[in-house]
Structure formats: C-alpha cells, structure tokens
Image: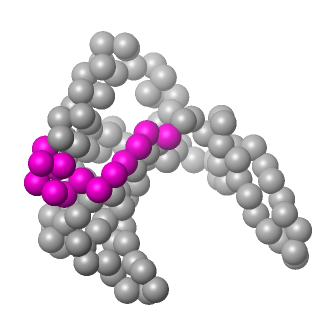
Amino acid sequence: MQYLMLIYHSEAGFEKTSESDRAAIYQEYGQLREELSAKGKFVGGNQLLPTTVATTVRVREGKRVVTDGPFAETKEQLGGYFLVNADDLDEAIAIAARIPSARNGTIEVRPIAVRGKAVQA
C-alpha cells in the first residue's frame, strides 16, 4: 500500500539552523531515502520551497481567487513529502518516525486512494 508522508516543520526555526546542522539533516534524509529505495519502499519525495513563494487558488461562486502564500496561518508549514510503499499502517508509521523532521515537526501519514480505494503497492 502507498502512503504519503506530509512533512510539517517551522520554516522560521529551520532558517535559524546552522549550515553544518542543515548538512547533517540533509545527509540523514539522503541515507533514509537510499535505505528505503534499496528495499523498494521509497516511491518519491521532495523538499518544498518556503511558503513565501506559495500561491493559493480557490474558486468561489465560479470565480477564481488567487492569493500569495498558504491558505492559513499556522506554526508549522508543509515543507516536503515522502511517498512510500509500506505493508501496512504500522510500517508506514515506523518509516515516518525515522524522517528527521519528526524530531521537531510533524509527519502526517495518509494512505493513497485511487477512485476511493486504497492503492496496493
């Protein structure tokens, strides 16, 4: 089954992280991706640019409304994602707990659905 892991963290906090600490975090992400890839578990994932360059689109009463930034004020912002194959929710949770941002942010684990049904890996 495929699970999307939405990685939330504080952009302001991450900006305060030293270059050497960032390098260590990115290295840890790389190692996790390599390990999961070797097991056929990693499907994809990317870091997102900050919310300062995000655009939100809504359609209300047939009219498109475009605004800069995210749709809501929050302490944590969506910073990236992992898409993985996991045997079940327990394995997906175990993988999510290994994502470096879980230590100071939040990882939301969501099963992928196609036409309303869960996707099998």
Residue located 42% across and 80% down the image: 114
Q: Is residue 94 visible?
A: no
Which residue is more in the foreground, 24 or 13?
A: 24
* Residue at 37 percent of width and 14 percent of height: 18
The residue depicted at 50 percent of the width and 40 percent of the height is 48
Q: Is residue 96 magenta?
A: no
In the image, residue 28 sits, relative to residue 95, either above or below, namely above
Relative to 63, 49 lies left or right: left
Image color mode: one colour
From the top left corner, tell me how far across and down residue 23 is, in percent.
30, 19
Residue 90 lies left or right of residue 112; in this view the side is: left
Question: Which one is nearer the viewer's eye here, 18 or 30?
Answer: 30
Image coordinates for residue 66, horizontal then vertical, percent: 80, 53
The answer to whether residue 1 shows anywhere in this view is yes
Give the x, y percent position of residue 32: 19, 41
| Residue 119 percent coordinates (x, y) | 32, 78
Q: Quick one: 114 or 19, which is closer to the camera?
A: 114
* Residue 65 in the image: above or below residue 74: below
Quarter of the rendering occupied by the C terminus: bottom left
Q: Is residue 8 left or right of residue 97?
A: right
The residue under the point 49% across, 47% down is 78
Which residues, given as a range, are shown in magenta?
35-48
For residue 13, above or below residue 64: above
Q: Quadrant of the N terminus?
A: bottom left
Residue in front for this viewpoint, 54 or 73: 54
**Above or below, 99 relative to 83:** above
Counting labels gives 0
